[in-house]
Image (spheres, helix red, strand yellow):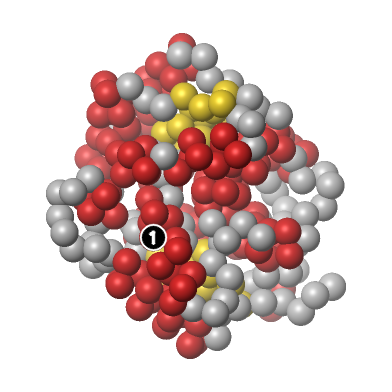
Amino acid sequence: MSKKKTLGILGGMGPVATVYFYKLITEHTVAARDSDHLNILITSRADIPDRTDFIMGRTNVSPAPFMCRDAVALENMGADVIAVPCNTAHYFHDDITAAVSIPVLNIVSITADHVKRRGFTRAGILATEGTIRIGAYKRELQKLGVGCVEPDEKTQAKVTEIIYDYVKAGRPGGDALFKRVAREMYERGCDCLILGCTELSLVSDGDENTIDSLETLAYASITACGGESCGFSDAFSKAYETNISQDAVIHHI
């Protein structure tokens, strides 16, 4: 088995999603004792400027320098691989990778790859306005020959409400609104839903046709660092029946 690598989590976008991501990794790593878990370093600077506000032109303060600062800090602390549990942050993926000499996993391409592995042909994309605006998932899915459905204006407004007014604000009740959004997307002909915002992972109903980008990133992080994964759903795990190597995961950068 390859030597275990240290994972750096560039977090804080948002803090609750970062906590959940760490929980996913620890719950899904085969470990009989503490030392079997991954070595993980975490930054969680909540003052990183909002990614969507910058992309949508609502502010001219770019979050890129802040994320690059944290990526460099993680590398200097000994991280071998970096994971960023924020989909919208991947608009700045090239900036982050240019700032460090270690791999930075790409949550968008990893999740699109999982959709393809599962055999879905028309994915509904639920994400921030920023992620939708830059076409991150649409572009990656098209490369793989997978169609996509993006929310219309009214549905996107509901998604934004779930992300900012419920999850980020710490208010309960977002799960009920999520069910309405899911129904609207399936009525438009998609055969799966991509949770393309890490806050949505916290209100999902766990349907097997819902692809959680935090789960795919957790799996990729465990694999890239030389760990062994466990506890994912049968549908999720079946996508990786042909083993995926550390090198193959790190290809998604």
User: What is the residue that sits farthest to the left in this orientation?
Assistant: 59
| Mark 1 burial class by Cα count in 10 Å: few <14, some 14-19, many 20+ | some
Question: Where is residue 136 drawn, in percent x and y?
Answer: 45, 44
Q: In this figure, which residue is indicated by the disc labeled 1?
A: 92
Is 225 above or below relative to 155?
Answer: below
Residue at 46%, 12% (x, y): give it: 187
Relative horizontal placement of residue 96, taking residue 169 as reference (left or right)? right
Q: Please indicate, yes or no, whether residue 89 appears anywhere in the rendered image.
A: yes
| Three-letter amino acid code at the position of disc 1 | Phe
Q: Give the image location of residue 75, x and y in percent.
A: 50, 82
Q: Position of residue 58 (x, y in %)?
A: 15, 49
Q: Is mark 1 on a helix, strand or loop?
A: helix
Q: At x 80% / y 75%, what residue is drawn?
A: 2
| Residue 127: quadrant of the picture | top left
Of all residues, the one furthest to the top in this rendering is 187
64 versus 131 height, above or below:
below
Q: Quadrant of the N terminus?
A: bottom right
Q: Is residue 172 above or below residue 39?
A: above
Q: Quadrant of residue 121?
A: top right
Q: Quadrant of residue 69?
A: bottom left
Give left or right: position of 149 versus 224: left
Residue at (48% x, 87% y) in the render? 76
93 on left or right of 191 = left
